[in-house]
Amino acid sequence: MIIIESSKLSSFILHATLLTGLSFVTHATAQSTYLIDLNNKTAIELGAFPTSLSRPTAINDSGQVVGYFATVWGSSHAFITGPHGVGITDLGTLGGAQSFAYGINDAGQVVGRSELPSRGSAHAFITGVNGEGMRDLGPLGSNYSEGLAINGAGRVVGRANASDTNFGHAFITGPNGEGARDLGTLGGNYSVGLAVNSSGQVVGRAYTSENNFPRAFITGPNGEGMKELSALTGHYSEARDINDSGEVVGWSYASPNILSAHAFITGPNGEGARDLGTLGGSFSEALGINDSGEVVGQADTRDYNTKHAFITGPKGDGMADLNSLVDLPEGVILTRAVDINNTGQVVAMASVIPEPEVYALLLAGLCLIRFMNWRNKFFPPHPFPQEAPKFLYLPSPSAFISKLGRPGLPSAVFSPVDFSHGFHCVINLACKRRCSSVRS
């Protein structure tokens, strides 16, 4: 027979109630996705996801957004929206449990990665127009590949494991994802292509022959001739996006002695580089650029290095906090601007500050738990009335032992407990010692 003291039972119930409430707070503070229109300063939340967890990755000039969301089963699925972020379509998978969308062109062709039915395998995929029909791009050398960006001609760039090693190499395909070519490295054993413009210039990161830290790279048209962005003097850098003029953005550590990265922008064809600074803190990273040279990303603020989404003017001039430029719902903070198109739309991630009433409710519940524990310590609860039910079935100890994974019965076994003396004798150890009517 299991003996449960009433104070512990009450505390358990209250704790369970508060944990349930806390789950709503967690939901409220979960990341959400917003489409920002800089022309009319509006922010629209992308909804209709089965859970509150989603991550956008790219946007095209029609305002179609792609990314991935968490399903109710805990896996991730790629998604695409309609124009201007309206509607959500699950792109499915290549037969496995998960898929991720990373890039989209103006025709609505989407690229990403999907697991296969066989465990341990994932392949890059491409879709048709408006996300229709996911197609496997193949292993591209081994059992792992991912498509990370696509240009208007349907040329896909990304990363694929080389056939004789587990190290990834950047690749580029022909139009509509046909064929694939290894772009090599900067002398080391790893590279990844993160973006491609209309002429086929690819940017990303690659290891040098020293293999100490990856460095940002750019190629010529059609992915020819990988070279390091030499204007970046830091020991660690990454190129994240490139526009049709060849202006490259990303982030770089200025020197080995500096522990935080700074966003940068280059001139045409990756020439030169300029530090974009921060929003007052120590860190920033540039994630997207449009053909006007407007840059978006994430940066620390002066407020205890809190991260906010940022945007610059053309050619990367004048970093500004994106939160100050749009009308946002109360409590919403844009934390990371992921991409920007040529029509003034930005896709960003946001967090929501819970209302003060929620915190007050949790605090009141915790105080109530403390009070009940104190009360039960000095004023033990009274027995239930005599007219209470005479018998109660409680799980036997072996059932609880079995639940804990220790030797015991395979399923719960319930034992009758006579508590005609009052329920107090079941839940109070002192009363149990006095009451001979309690048995199991």
Image (tube, rainbow, N blue to C red):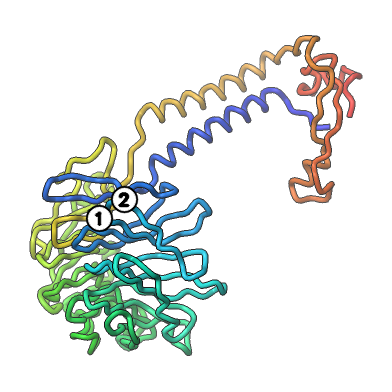
Q: Is residue 133 visible?
A: yes
Q: Is residue 282 visible?
A: no
Q: Residue at x 52, y 68 (%)?
A: 96
Give neighbour class at mark 1: few <14, some 14-19, many 20+ (Cα, 10 Å). many
The x and y percentages for residue 371 are: 56, 19
- Disc 1, SS: strand
Viewer-closest of 143 and 322: 143
Where does the C terminus fall, quadrant-wise? top right
- Disc 2, SS: strand
Q: Please say if 435 is above or below 67.
A: above
The x and y percentages for residue 417 are: 85, 25
What is the quadrant of residue 77 in the picture?
A: bottom left
Q: Residue at x 41, y 30 (%)?
A: 359
The dot on residue 395 is: none
Q: Is disc 2 in contact with disc 1, using a CB cutoff of under 8 Å?
A: yes
The dot on residue 347 is: 1
The x and y percentages for residue 78 are: 40, 62
Q: Please say if 234 is above or below 348.
A: below
Three-letter code, disc 2:
Thr
Precedes in sequence: disc 2 or disc 1: 2
Q: Which residue is mark 2?
A: 33
- Cα distance between the residues tagged 2 and 1: 7 Å
What is the quadrant of residue 211 in the picture?
A: bottom left
Viewer-closest of 104 and 416: 104
Viewer-closest of 159 and 239: 159
The x and y percentages for residue 43 are: 22, 45
Three-letter code, disc 1:
Val
